């Protein structure tokens, strides 16, 4: 049976194909499904199957079989169209057009075959992308005249036009070359008059609901790019406004009006826009009176009514974004504008994330537009940066602008005040808050971060900061008023208190210092009172979480008010004994955050105190941490480490460190003492856990104390290595006795945790101990055997990946000082790690990344050591790099590519340049082209381009003095390396992309050689090639778009935005700023 289908020399047996497709879609057994899948795949991949498509479409009764045939045809049209003879192309074109006309000419077949017709439309548009306009000039006139012959045919013609517009204007990037997109856009523009007449004709003459809806949908697709005269100098706009009140067309018409509202082309049509808006508002009040409770209407509405409210939000925000200024000009349009803003504020209260996002997006823009001109007048320097003005012209500008800006602010003062209330009531949850309400109404610790909420918080925070700058008094009044309603119980609820406190925390840094101090004193006092007077564990937990969030946001205030700072920290210590989910965690997080910003305050003796706070804290430390979990204790120790770091007197610092580490050191000494009498004590699981805990505490302090941790690590270093070696031997013997499963037991896992934490502690200390090379020399020799030797001796499953990252850190830190140790490191880890990670792309993911980071550190700082490797070892290094950038895991591939670039740059200037490039140039080029064109490695695009540019520039620079080709295998000699590389690249790409002509390939390679010194041109040239080679669109899935090809441009924009944010007080939260004025 399968053989019969595979034989394409005669017409395919359609009945047999139907039953195969039916088997695939599930009527048969699993084995039958698999067999059917196999046959269909073979047919799909057979280059001759498409010749049977017409025969299948004419004879099959099964819709799925027809879809299968069209899928085969679609791939031929996409990737092999230009290679087909003209008569075959015309045959396909005419057949598809005839079937579409035939099926959509009468009502019954059109409704019955709707899915099939839709698929045929898509195929026709794929043909058009190749044929129109040059080889099918009459397409649009033919389509329009056909549309006038019957209403159903007309409806389908609308669908085809809509698809065409979307293909050209919305989905073309990365699917077609820049030149082709331009050509299609020009054709659509020049032919639009016929389409325009057809749409108006339908809207004025037809009574058919489906046809009118299809026409409105097509118009919607076209409105974003057609010349404006077609909208404003024809009856189109009036026609749309006439359709708006009709319920069945309301949503489609509103989408069209939104599209028109978002167009911007100078001020020529301003008056038309005012008229359009005025008529629209009159009609809107009949459909949805302004007194309606919109959130309720949305909650109880049908899906059409809900879509209407969402579309309304889109209409207002689009119209205002482009044309709000013209509505401000007359009294009549101003009142219509204020009414529209009132609608938009009411819609903003709708309980739906998508609707709220639309509104929020616009509010953010509006408040920025109101705030920025004032900010620029007050800060001329910022204005120059933003508006590109010359400084001397600013004073004149201010005289005229001042009153105008104030009038504009005045106009919006009422809606802005309502907007402040909206932002306070709907404030999103910030990242720091981890005490939340679950779906059952219980207060719990948050387990997962919700990224959507965090993005929303960021935008709301920014909006509220602008609103605060616009009117500090109103912001303060609204917040305090809501807070007093919490206190008197009028408005008390968890949600109301949360959103209010999140809003208060979010405007930190935006008020003048004096006002902020006054405001905060009242807020913190009220919140502490609320905590005292409210009963109930859950209620107290919510209030505690809010107090902690607010105080964590105002470090500047705390620095200036010691009494408040002390009260707050003591309150945090109280919360550390509160065993409600999340409260202790948040108390420790907030403590760390406050200490980082106010650390100097804790080591000075403050007015009215007998000793510095840190000393008092160390005396009562055991009591404070008594109820904390181990991970919370580590965080607490890290915080105290920050305090000690701020002490400038070395003697005091060492004394504080000794007192801080007293508890863990006593325990450590006790364990080591017992072990010296009997080593078996170290095998007890509770003892192992204690050791792990002690090491983690040390790591936390090392993290915050940096180089000052030296006395403590010296104290435990050698004992720690002894324990490391012993546990390592214990792991090996356990695995040797218990077989491979022993490595998964909890006992072995626990022992390995101790080894990992030891490595992490040393790495943390080395990393934080700035500019002290003697430390490297002191710590590295004792580690050579216990750590490196142990890694080499161990079984693969028992090797710690942290060894690799530790030595990468050491080499990055001490650079050339480590040169002599590189061969030893190389010998211990290189070969054995490669064997672990090159078997496949999945095993040992931790080792992979850390291995390449270590290699990169060696290549960057100890390159000379690499040059001295034997040629076998160097080949291993190069193979592993190529293997890394072939990896589909993005960070491994990127590490590999960065490493490759560094190696290439270093070898270019070394005396082994000719030898190295003769061995590896061709291989590297071939491998980079392979990952560049295989669609799995798109995120690496920027680095692929840089490597290719480096290779092409190297060849062009004549710095290579010997030929790259092997004279033995290449029969003739090339005039230069450039000629060899050109010839090699053309052959390589020609054989890889048989669908491209040799002229296209040659043009591309010559273009690379021409543009090699201009990165932007070089990159664009490669982007176009990727589209042309059709590899990019061949197996691309819809969610795998081409944005990675444009990632670099996006990064530059982000940096520009950050610089702008730094110029506005409060926009970057005070606790995110790296403030050096930390503790005056």
Image (cartoon, rainbow, N blue to C red):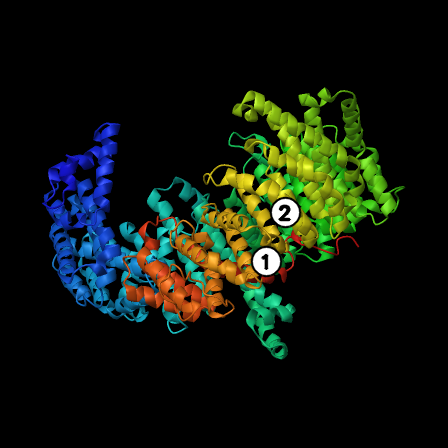
Q: Quick check: 481 above or below 624?
A: below
Residue situated in front as seen by the camera: 274 or 86: 86
Can residue 755 be seen at all in this image of the molecule? yes
Q: Which residue corresponds to the image point at 49% horizontal and 70% vertical from the top-left?
A: 958
Quadrant of residue 731 in the image?
A: top right
Position in image of residue 508 (x %, y %): 66, 52
For the N terminus, the image quarter is top left
Q: Which of marks 2 and 1 is in front?
A: 2
Residue projecting furthest to the front: 968
Alpha-carbon span between mark 2 and mark 1: 59 Å
Name the mark on residue 872. none
Is 820 positioned to the left or the right of 81 in the image?
right
Can residue 1057 be seen at all in this image of the molecule? no
User: Callout 1: few (<14), some (14-19), or many (20+) C-alpha neighbours within 10 Å?
Assistant: many
Is 281 positioned to the left or the right of 424 in the image?
left
- Callout 2 secondary element: helix
Position in image of residue 382 (x %, y %): 62, 68
Residue situated in front as seen by the camera: 139 or 753: 753
Q: Quick check: 588 above or below 859?
A: above
Q: Name the residue under label 1.
A: 466
Contact between marks 2 and 1 (CB within 8 A): the answer is: no
Quadrant of residue 141 in the image?
A: bottom left
How many labels were placed on the picture? 2
Position in image of residue 841 (x %, y %): 46, 41
Is 987 positioned to the left or the right of 349 in the image?
left
Name the mark on residue 823. 2
């Amino acid at each position: 049976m399968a053989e019969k289908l595979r034989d394409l020399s005669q017409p395919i047996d359609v009945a047999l194909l139907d039953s195969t497709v039916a088997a695939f879609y599930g009527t048969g057994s699993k084995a039958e499904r698999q067999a059917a899948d196999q046959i269909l795949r073979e047919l799909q991949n057979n280059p001759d199957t498409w010749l049977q498509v017409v025969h299948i479409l004419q004879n099959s009764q099964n819709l799925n079989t027809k879809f299968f045939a069209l899928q085969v045809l679609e791939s031929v049209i996409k990737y092999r169209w230009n290679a087909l003879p003209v008569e075959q192309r015309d045959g396909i074109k005419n057949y598809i057009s005839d079937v579409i006309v035939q099926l959509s000419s009468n009502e019954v077949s059109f409704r019955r075959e709707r899915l099939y017709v839709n698929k045929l439309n898509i195929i026709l548009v794929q043909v058009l992308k190749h044929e129109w306009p040059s080889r099918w000039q009459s397409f649009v006139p033919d389509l329009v005249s056909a549309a006038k012959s019957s209403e159903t045919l007309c409806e389908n013609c609308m669908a085809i036009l809509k698809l065409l517009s979307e293909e050209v204007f919305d989905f073309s990037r990365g699917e077609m070359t820049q030149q082709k997109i331009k050509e299609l856009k020009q054709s659509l523009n020049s032919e639009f008059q016929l389409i325009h007449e057809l749409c108006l004709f339908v809207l004025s003459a037809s009574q058919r609901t489906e046809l009118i809806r299809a026409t409105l949908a097509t118009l919607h697709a076209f409105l974003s790019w057609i010349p404006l005269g077609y909208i404003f100098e024809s009856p189109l706009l009036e026609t749309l406004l006439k359709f708006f009140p009709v319920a069945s067309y309301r949503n489609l018409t509103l989408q069209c009006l939104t599209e028109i509202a978002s167009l911007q082309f100078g001020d020529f049509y301003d008056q038309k826009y005012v008229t359009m808006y005025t008529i629209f508002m009159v009609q809107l009040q009949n459909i949805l009176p302004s007194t309606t409770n919109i959130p309720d209407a949305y909650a109880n509405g049908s899906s059409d009514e809900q879509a209407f409210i969402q579309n309304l939000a889109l209409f207002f925000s689009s119209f205002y974004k482009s044309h709000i200024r013209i509505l401000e000009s007359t009294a009549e349009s101003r009142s219509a504008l204020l009414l529209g803003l009132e609608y938009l504020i009411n819609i903003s209260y709708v309980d739906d994330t998508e609707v709220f996002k639309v509104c929020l997006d616009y509010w953010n823009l509006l408040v920025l537009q109101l705030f920025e001109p004032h900010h620029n007048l007050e800060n001329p320097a910022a204005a120059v940066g933003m508006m590109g003005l010359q400084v001397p012209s600013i004073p004149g500008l201010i005289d005229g602008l001042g009153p105008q800006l104030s009038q504009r602010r005045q106009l919006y003062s009422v809606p802005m005040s309502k907007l402040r209330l909206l932002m306070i009531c709907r404030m999103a949850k910030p990242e720091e808050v981890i005490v939340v309400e679950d779906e059952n109404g219980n207060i719990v610790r948050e387990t997962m971060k919700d990224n959507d909420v965090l993005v929303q918080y960021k935008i709301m925070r920014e909006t509220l900061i602008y609103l605060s700058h616009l009117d500090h008094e109103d912001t303060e009044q609204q917040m305090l008023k809501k807070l007093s309603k919490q206190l008197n119980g009028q408005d008390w609820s968890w949600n109301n208190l949360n959103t209010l406190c999140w809003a208060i925390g979010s405007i930190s840094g935006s008020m003048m210092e004096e006002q902020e101090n006054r405001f905060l004193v009242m807020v913190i006092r009220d919140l502490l009172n609320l905590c005292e007077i409210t009963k109930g564990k859950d209620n107290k937990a919510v209030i505690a979480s809010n107090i902690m969030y607010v105080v964590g946001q105002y470090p500047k205030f705390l620095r200036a008010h010691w009494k408040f700072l002390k009260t707050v920290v003591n309150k945090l210590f109280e919360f550390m004994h509160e065993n409600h989910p999340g409260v202790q965690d948040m108390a420790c997080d907030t403590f760390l955050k406050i200490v980082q910003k106010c650390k100097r305050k804790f080591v000075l003796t403050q007015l009215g105190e007998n000793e510095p706070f840190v000393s008092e804290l160390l005396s009562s430390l055991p009591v404070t941490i008594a109820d904390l979990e181990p991970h919370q204790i580590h965080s607490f120790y890290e915080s105290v480490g920050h305090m000690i770091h701020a002490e400038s007197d070395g003697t005091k610092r060492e004394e504080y460190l000794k007192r801080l580490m007293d508890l863990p050191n006593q325990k450590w000494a006790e364990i080591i003492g017992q072990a010296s009498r009997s080593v078996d004590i170290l095998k007890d699981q509770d003892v192992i856990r204690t050791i792990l805990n002690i090491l983690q505490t040390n790591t936390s302090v090392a993290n915050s104390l940096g180089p000052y941790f030296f006395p403590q690590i010296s104290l435990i270093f050698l004992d720690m290595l002894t324990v490391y070696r012993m546990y390592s031997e214990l792991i090996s013997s356990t695995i040797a006795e218990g077989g491979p499963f022993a490595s998964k037991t909890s006992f072995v896992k626990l022992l390995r945790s101790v080894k990992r934490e030891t490595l992490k502690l040393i790495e943390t200390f080395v990393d934080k101990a700035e500019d002290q090379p003697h430390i490297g020399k002191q710590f590295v020799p004792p580690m050579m055997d216990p750590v490196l030797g142990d890694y080499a001796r161990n079984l693969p499953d028992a090797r710690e990946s942290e060894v690799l990252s530790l030595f990468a850190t050491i080499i990055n830190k001490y650079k050339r000082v480590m040169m002599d140790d590189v061969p030893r490191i190389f010998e211990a880890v290189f070969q054995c790690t490669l064997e672990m990670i090159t078997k496949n792309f999945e095993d040992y993911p931790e080792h992979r990344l850390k291995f390449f980071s270590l290699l990169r550190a060696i290549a960057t700082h100890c390159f000379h050591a690499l040059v001295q490797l034997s040629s076998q070892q160097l080949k291993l290094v190069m193979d592993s790099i190529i293997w890394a950038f072939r990896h589909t895991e993005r960070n491994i591939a990127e590490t590999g590519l960065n490493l490759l670039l560094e190696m290439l740059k270093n070898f270019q200037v070394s005396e082994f340049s000719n030898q190295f490039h003769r061995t590896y140039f061709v291989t590297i080029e071939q491998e980079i082209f392979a990952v560049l064109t295989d669609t799995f490695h798109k995120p690496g695009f920027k680095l692929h381009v840089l490597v290719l540019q480096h290779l092409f520039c190297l060849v062009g620079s004549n710095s290579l003095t010997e030929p790259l080709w092997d004279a033995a295998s290449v029969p003739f000699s090339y005039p230069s390396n450039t000629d060899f590389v050109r010839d090699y690249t053309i052959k390589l790409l020609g054989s890889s992309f048989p669908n491209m002509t040799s002229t296209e390939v040659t043009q591309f390679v010559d273009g690379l050689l021409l543009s090699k010194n201009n990165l932007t041109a070089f990159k664009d040239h490669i982007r176009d090639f990727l589209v042309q080679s059709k590899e990019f669109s061949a197996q691309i899935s819809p969610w795998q778009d081409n944005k990675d090809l444009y990632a670099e441009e996006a990064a530059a924009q982000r940096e520009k935005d950050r610089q702008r944010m730094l110029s506005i007080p409060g926009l970057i939260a005070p606790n995110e700023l790296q403030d050096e004025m930390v503790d005056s």
